[in-house]
Image (cartoon, rainbow, N blue to C red):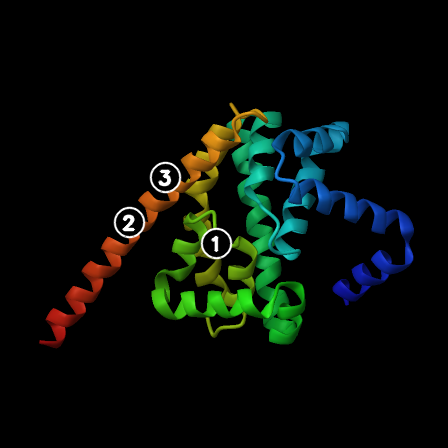
Amino acid sequence: MVLLAVLALYNFVPVIKMNIKQVFFILSNMDVDLVRGYILGFGIWAPIVSFLLMIFQSVVAPLPAFIITFANASLFGWVYGAILSWSSAMVGAALCFYIARFLGRAAVEKLTSRTALEKVDHFFKLYGKYAIVIARLLPFISFDIVSYAAGLTSMGFWPFFIATGIGQLPATLVYSYIGGMLTGTTKTFVTGLLILFAVSALMVLIKQIWNDKNKEVEKSV
């Protein structure tokens, strides 16, 4: 009912439609300064607007969440920015999970895409119980599509939510710390740093998975 109400407002209220298109353009432009300026323009309401932006990007996959994280750190300091980014991302993840759980795959494919969802399905089969944590640590895997995909599985909400929180926390802290020093001219540096962090995290997790599989083989023998 909430989604239908939002769609109705979008289609029949021109001001809302215009603002949503503006937000979509700002986030998809991948410009931290642009996002920062947009949030700052709301004055004392800036933290609330940032919170809602993070939820919006969660539902409308695959807009980049880390751009908002960088902007939050720049505006509110890296500590408060990290708290704001992490908590709002968690709410967005929960919303995506329940949208998928209650509305099913057909609705999720319309919000994302069938191809993207199939890739995440394969990712889940490949990494099993580690899939959520790994996905949260890798910036090039859509945060939102993973949340939707998890809602389509038999996974319970709390295991999903806890894994999301654990996986999202280190990335949020690192991105927030860097975001406090970020300017529009350092995108290349930040991109390199994100890739380095993601690869390092993936190597650690792959090692853990390998060790677990070896233990299972030893037990079977």
Quickly name the residue at label 1. Answer: 141
* Left or right: 202, with 177 as reference point: left
Label annotation for residue 196: 3
Q: Label 1's element? A: loop
Please name the amino acid that badge 2 sits on.
Met
Checking the image for residue 94, the label placed there is: none
Q: Amino acid at mark 3?
A: Leu
Marks 2/3: CA–CA distance: 11 Å
Residue at image coords 66%, 56%: 60
At 63% from the left edge and 34% from the top edge, which residue is drawn?
31
**Residue 78 percent coordinates (x, y):** 52, 28
Residue named by callout 2:
203
- What residue is rendered at 8% in x and 76% in y? 221
Q: Which residue is at a point 60% across and 45% down the rendered structure image?
A: 88
Q: Is residue 156 visible?
A: no
> Mark 2 touching mark 3, by CB under 8 A?
no
For the residue carrying disc 3, how many other residues have a C-alpha within 10 Å: few (<14), some (14-19), or many (20+)? few
Q: Amino acid at mark 1?
A: Ile
Q: Quadrant of the N terminus?
A: bottom right
Label 2 secondary element: helix
Q: Nearer the viewer, residue 163 or 40?
A: 40
